[in-house]
Image: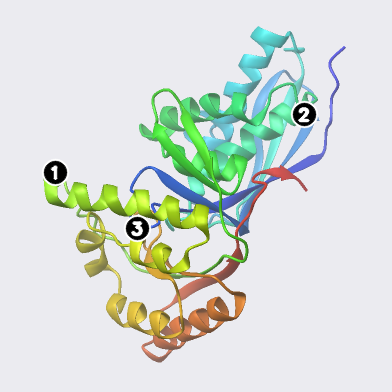
Amino acid sequence: MTKILTGIKVSAPATVANLNCGTDSLAIALKSPADEIIIYKFGPAGIRIRSISGDKKKLSTKIAENTAGLAALSVWRFLVEKHGVDSDIGIELEIRKKIPVDSGLGSNEALAVAGGMAVNEFFGGLLTKRELLPLLAAAEYGVLGAVSLPCLAASLLGSCMLVRDADSCDIHRITLPRGLYFAMICPQVNMIEQIPAQVSIQAAIKQAGNLAALILGFNNTDFNLISRAMEDSIMEHHISGSIPYFEELKTVVKNYGALSFGIADKGPTLFAFCNSSVKAEESLSAMESIYSSNKIKYNAWFSAVNMEGAELS
């Protein structure tokens, strides 16, 4: 008999993708913010979204147009087909959006992770997190026509995840030093994406060298190497012009001892990556001061690295 756990809450964390030198291959999970989904049993068979809060009415309540909804449906169908769970049980999702939509912090991925994991836990946790990942990736592609596998993997599994090959879901957990923190600020601006269609050989070689050096730096707790390696030779030049006071923010956080400064995924959130909470707090305060004094509206967060990923909460 299928074990049913109704009224449970799953929390899926935001992520910082790319880390400057790992475009479309690296992401780190954050302690906060995190999206939450509460799952309930209800009368008619099927899955529906009961309510969405915190999204400023940007998300659809239609299952096929919401990454949480389609991920939930994908996992439910798999469990019905492969594990024989009761297909007559109805499911409702209450979505509590804590990660701003279009912030560059893995908002869609966290929704997919929370929706898919909630259904899995509802039926007693029949699948491991690694088994969930391809189902979540397929669901995200179904809604968006694209997948950010590093963000999905990091939000689901925690820590820093490296994607060697997205098509085969070949992912690997990267060993991290202790005491890493992010200071993040997201200006309320409209991004003008100017993503390069092609990358020069020289830029690709430099990026590959920096990515390898970053992994080595993490493994050896070599903060000087980590700082030198976290350099973006591909994306930053094309995006930074759309983000107000980018260079000023970069200079000030480096003065407060941040290891690196960069753009989370494709922005507009900016991050200062630090090896102490004090440096991260000071960096965040300095970034807020620049935006406040120039009357730029923003959201801001301070977070340690999330080593566990999505969880029941």
Q: Which residue is mark 2?
A: 122
Image coordinates for residue 241, horizontal then vertical, percent? 22, 69
28 or 96: which is nearer to us? 28
Q: What is the CA distance from the residue labelled 2 to the residue labelled 1?
A: 44 Å
The residue shown at (72%, 18%) is 45
Q: In front of the other: label 1 or label 3?
A: 3
Q: Secondary structure at mark 1?
A: loop
54 lies above or below 63: below
Q: Secondary structure at mark 3?
A: loop
Going by the picture, which residue comes out furthest to the front? 220
Task: Return the disc, 1 or 3, that comes first in the chain's sequence.
Answer: 3
Q: Quadrant of residue 2?
A: top right
Q: Quadrant of residue 41?
A: top right
The image's mark for residue 20 is 3
Task: Return the disc, 3 or 2, that comes first in the chain's sequence.
Answer: 3
Q: What is the CA distance from the residue labelled 3 to the residue labelled 2?
A: 37 Å
| Quarter of the figure with the N terminus | top right
Mark 3 surroundings: few (<14), some (14-19) or many (≥20) residues within 10 A: many
Tag 2: amino acid: Phe
Kindly tell me whether residue 159 is visible in this rendering. Answer: yes
Mark 1 surroundings: few (<14), some (14-19) or many (≥20) residues within 10 A: few
The residue shown at (28%, 78%) is 247
Q: In front of the other: label 2 or label 1?
A: 1
184 lies above or below 56: below
**255 sits to left or right of 157:** left
Task: Return the disc, 2 or 1, that comes first in the chain's sequence.
Answer: 2
253 or 48: which is nearer to us? 253
Tag 1: amino acid: Gln
Q: Which residue is mark 1?
A: 198
The residue shown at (57%, 22%) is 74
